[in-house]
Amino acid sequence: SLGIGEGREKKSMHPGDNCRIEETIRKYSNMLYRICLVYLANEDQAEDALQETFIRYMKKAPKLNDAEHEKAWLIRVATNICRDISRFRLRNTDLNIDDFENYCGTDDKSTEILELVLNLPQKHKEVILLHYVEGYKVNEISELLGVSVSAVKKRLQYAREKLKLELEKEETE
């Protein structure tokens, strides 16, 4: 017994469910962890968010059409959990870039850009991450975040301009 939902009627698990869940965890853990880490800028909170994402996945056991729908569902749940953590927990305002570097192994220029991205406002940081790191199109990001396509475009435009200005400022120093 997994102990999940004890005291309530449990969904009957099919023999392939454990394999499907394990495969999903293997397939998406790294990507979801990166999203949570960039979103929360805290390794422990990112791990908590990742764990909670998979707990919800196991509890709800959603039947999704294909791998892209599954990936989108997991990203949506993970970003919502990160939003909740940001809202209700005291956050470490000093972004610890070392956590991300240790995980991703970035070079100096990438680290510099990453630091700038991490310092963007949350709504701009998440669209940059989803678009450039995870490869989502604007309309897909719109669906994931529940905002209009024009809002996503505006956020991307603002974030690019802000990053460009910051990089130019650092080059002249």
Image (cartoon, rainbow, N blue to C red):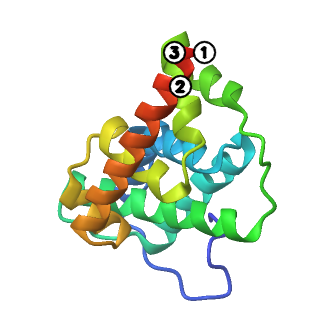
> Which kind of residue does numbered mark 1 sit on?
Glu
Verify CB contact (< 8 Å) between mark 2 and mark 3: yes
Q: Is residue 78 left or right of residue 115?
A: left
Question: Given the image, on which type of amino acid does mark 3 rest?
Answer: Glu
The answer to whether residue 106 shows anywhere in this view is no
Pointer 3 residue: 171
The three-letter code of the residue at mark 2 reads: Lys
The residue where tag 1 is placed is 173
Calculate the distance from the C-alpha at mark 2 to the C-alpha at mark 3.
6 Å
Viewed as shown, does residue 94 lie left or right of 130?
right
Disc 1 secondary structure class: loop
Q: Is residue 148 above or below residue 76?
A: below
SS at circle 2: helix
- The picture places residue 33, in percent across and down from the top left corner, at 54, 42
Q: Residue at x 55, y 54 (%)?
A: 121
Residue pushed farthest top? 107
Q: Is residue 14 above or below residue 94?
A: below
Pointer 3 local density, CA inside 10 Å: few below 14, some 14–19, many at least 20:
few
Q: Nearer the viewer, residue 44 or 133?
A: 133
